Image (cartoon, rainbow, N blue to C red):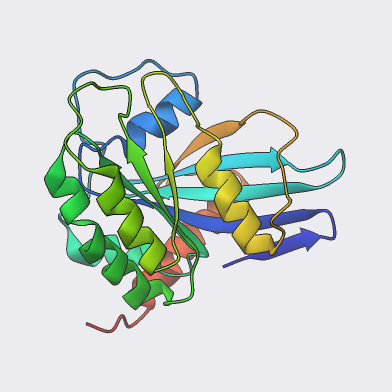
Amino acid sequence: MAVIANDNHRKYKICLIGDGGVGKTTYINRVLDGPFIKEYIATQGVVVHKATFWVSSEHSILFDVWDTAGQEKKAGLKDLYYVGADAAIFFFDVTSRISAHNLPVWISNFKRVAGADKPIVVVANKIDVVDRKVNKKNILNVVKTYDYDYCEVSARTTYNFAQPFLLLARKLTGNDELVFVTNINLAPTNVNYDMDGETDKNIAEDYDVAREVDIEE
């Protein structure tokens, strides 16, 4: 749920969603200047990354970025991530047709829990790979039909990394002219029940609240 800490700072909950192996966690790790993971290993648990973007010298937008963290096949747990979300970024792999084919299911599930009016960005990952199998024109036809935003990124080269967040920021603030004035600044937080600090406590509380929500099947 959107939080306005004061007139200068806004905070939003964002979900990273898509098939396992499409590069959601790798994308965030690369933004964090971590090593590029060539061998996919599913991450476990709830992981929230904090992304702060400055839009002026005094105004910032903080995204709490919830990564599904290798739990894509656990439907009940997955739904908990969506509760209270302000928007979502849906990833697919341009070398995997099935990951693009599954997008409507992911989007439908998210809307069912979070609400049909939430801003959505569809992201094509691994565009640096020569063996592209997903037709860009077909994807664009879908996103235009439903008024989703679309962009292409590369986890290997960090191409276009800020664009998904910028598109969401413009939708969430209602300002199509908004720009970021500083580089990406992400810090990972592993959400568990041994956390220290008020911020981690708040995220854990959000997770506990989500567990109590009666989600419509």
| Residue farthest to the top, as pictured | 35
**Relative to 164, is 158 above or below?**
above
The foreground one among 217 and 181 is: 181
Q: Nearer the viewer, residue 89 or 71?
A: 89
Please state the horizontal and vertical placement of residue 207, each as a whole percent of the image. Answer: 42, 62
Q: Residue at x 72, y 59 (%)?
A: 175
Q: Quadrant of the C terminus?
A: bottom left
Residue 135, percent from left and from top: 23, 43
Relative to 208, does residue 130 appear above or below in the rendering?
above
Q: Quadrant of residue 97?
A: top left
Residue farthest toward the front in the current orientation of the protein = 137
Circle count: 0
Q: Residue at x 50, y 32 (%)?
A: 161
Specify whether residue 89 is in view: yes
Residue 72 in view, yes or no = no
* 5 vs 101, nearest the viewer: 101
169 to the left or right of 135: right
In this view, 77 is above or below 45 = below
The answer to which image quadrant residue 131 occupies is top left
Q: In this rendering, would 78 be left or right of 114?
A: left
Relative side of 1 to 129, left or right:
right
Horizontal side of residue 32 vs 154, given as left or right: right
Corner quadrant of residue 29:
top left
Q: Position of residue 141 (x, y in %)?
A: 32, 59
Image quadrant occupied by the N terminus = bottom right
Name the spot of residue 18 as percent of width and height, x first.
27, 50
